[in-house]
Amino acid sequence: MKKFIALLLSLMMLLTLAACGEKGKTTDGGEDAGSTKLNIFMWGDYMSDDLVANFEKEYGVKVNLSYMNDNADSITKLTAGAGDGYDLIMTCDAYMESLIAGDYLEKLDLSQVPNSANINKAYWSEQNQDYCVPYLMNYIYVVYDTERCPIEITCYNDLIDPALKGQLGSIDGARNLFPIALIALGYDPNSTVESEIAEAYEWLVKYNANVVAYGSTESNICNGTISAMLTYDGNTAEAMATMGENNTLVIAPFTKDPVQLGFDLFVIPKGAQHTDLAYKFLNYVCDPQVMAANLVENPYSCPNDAAVAAASEEYRNAPAFNFDYKTNVFFQKDVGDALTIYDKYYQMLKVG
C-alpha cells in the first residue's frame, strides 16, 4: 500500500507546480544537525529574513533553510523518508490525504503549538489538523488590465476568446489548469472521469493558444507583455503595488465560476530529529505579531485571523484581497488513480 501511495505522489510531481506560488531558488541541504539546529525545506523568497533571524536570536538556534523548485521536490523528500535531514517541510493541501495514508508524517501535538488557535478552522480541514499547520494561502483567480485588455472577463470561458490571443499570462501545473477547464465545461474541478478530463484538455488547447508565457505573471502584466492573467493573489498584490497610483488592474468580476483556494502547510516528516525546535518554530510563526510582520514582505492571504487583525492597514485594505466571491471557492482533492490520466493529458498539452 505504501509503495502504491508513493507512486501516486510521484505522479503528482509531474502534475502540479506551485499551487502556492511562483517562487523558488534551490539549494541542497538537510544534513543531520545538533539540537540547536533546525532544518526546514520550503519555498524560497516566501518568509522574511527578519522572522528567521529573530527566531534564531530568541531561541539561540541556527535555522538551515533549503528551497524547493516545486511541490514535487517536497513530495520526493517526504516519500523517501525526509526525517533524517529535515525537521519541517512545506507542502500543500492537495497532497495531505495521501501523505497521511502513507504514514510519511508525524502526528502533531498541538498543545505544543498554542498559537495555532489563531488559525481559522475554516481554512484548516479537520482531517488534516493532526498532521499540519497552515502557513499562508492563496486564491487563484483572473486579473486583467482595464485599459489594455480587449475584453471584459467574467468567467473562465472568456479566457479562450480569440480576442485574448497574445494577451494572456498564466501560472502552470495540471492541478491549477485542468480545474478551470472542467468548471468551464460544467464538470467537477476534481473530476476522475477520463472523458471529462479529455474534454478539459481540448479546452486547454484553446487556452494555451492565447497564453504568451507561463510564470512571472506579476512582472509580465506590469511591463505590458500581457493584459490578463490567471494568477495567485500574492502575485496580484505585488503587481498592484508596483503600479501604485497608476494601477489599472482589476480582479475579474466572476458571477458564477468558483476560484481555487490553496494552502501552504508545514508538516513534520516521519522520524524528524529535532521535533522540539520544530514545535517552537511552528508556534512562533503562528504568533500574530510575527506573522503580521511577515505579511509585509509576503502579502498573500493568511489563515491566521489574529495576524490579519494585527497586520498593516495597507495589507488589510489591499485591492488584491478585495473581491466579492471569496466564499465561492473550490479545493484540490486527492484524485487517486486519475492522476495518471491527468498526467497523460498534461504532457500532451505541454508538448503541444
Image (cartoon, rainbow, N blue to C red):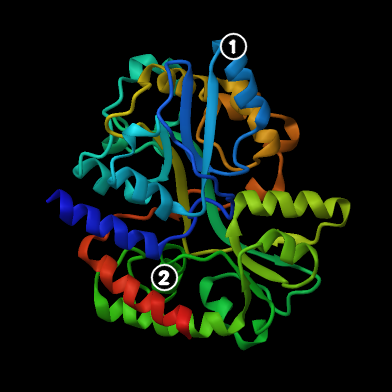
Q: Where is residue 34 in the image (x, y as percent from the top left)?
A: 43, 19
How packed mark 1 is, by other alpha carbons closer than 10 Å (few <14, some 14-19, many 20 or more), is few
How many numbered marks appear? 2
Seen as rendered, the residue at the extreme right is 245
Q: In this view, does 70 lie above or below 110?
A: below
Is residue 257 among what the camera can see? yes
Pick the front one: 274 or 8: 274
Is residue 309 among what the camera can see? no
How packed mark 2 is, by other alpha carbons closer than 10 Å (few <14, some 14-19, many 20 or more), is many
Q: Where is residue 341 in the image (x, y as percent from the top left)?
A: 28, 73
Q: Where is residue 14 in the image (x, y as percent from the top left)?
A: 38, 65
Q: Where is residue 240 in the image (x, y as percent from the top left)?
A: 76, 53
Residue 58 numbered tag: 1
Residue 66 numbered tag: none
Q: In this view, does 197 lie above or below 60?
A: below
What residue is rendered at 40% in x and 75% in y?
346
Residue type for callout 2: Phe
| First along the sequence among labels 2 and 1 | 1
Q: What residue is shown with label 2?
A: 178
Pick the front one: 93 or 106: 106
Is 218 displayed left or right of 118 in the figure? right
Is 166 displayed left or right of 157 in the figure? right
The quarter holding residue 220 reads bottom right
Q: Which of marks 2 and 1 is in front?
A: 1
What residue is rendered at 84% in x and 50% in y?
244
Callout 2 touching callout 1 (CB < 8 Å): no
Is 63 displayed left or right of 349 in the figure? right
Kindly state the secondary structure of the residue where label 2 is placed. helix
Is 122 displayed left or right of 239 in the figure? left
What residue is rendered at 54% in x and 80% in y?
208
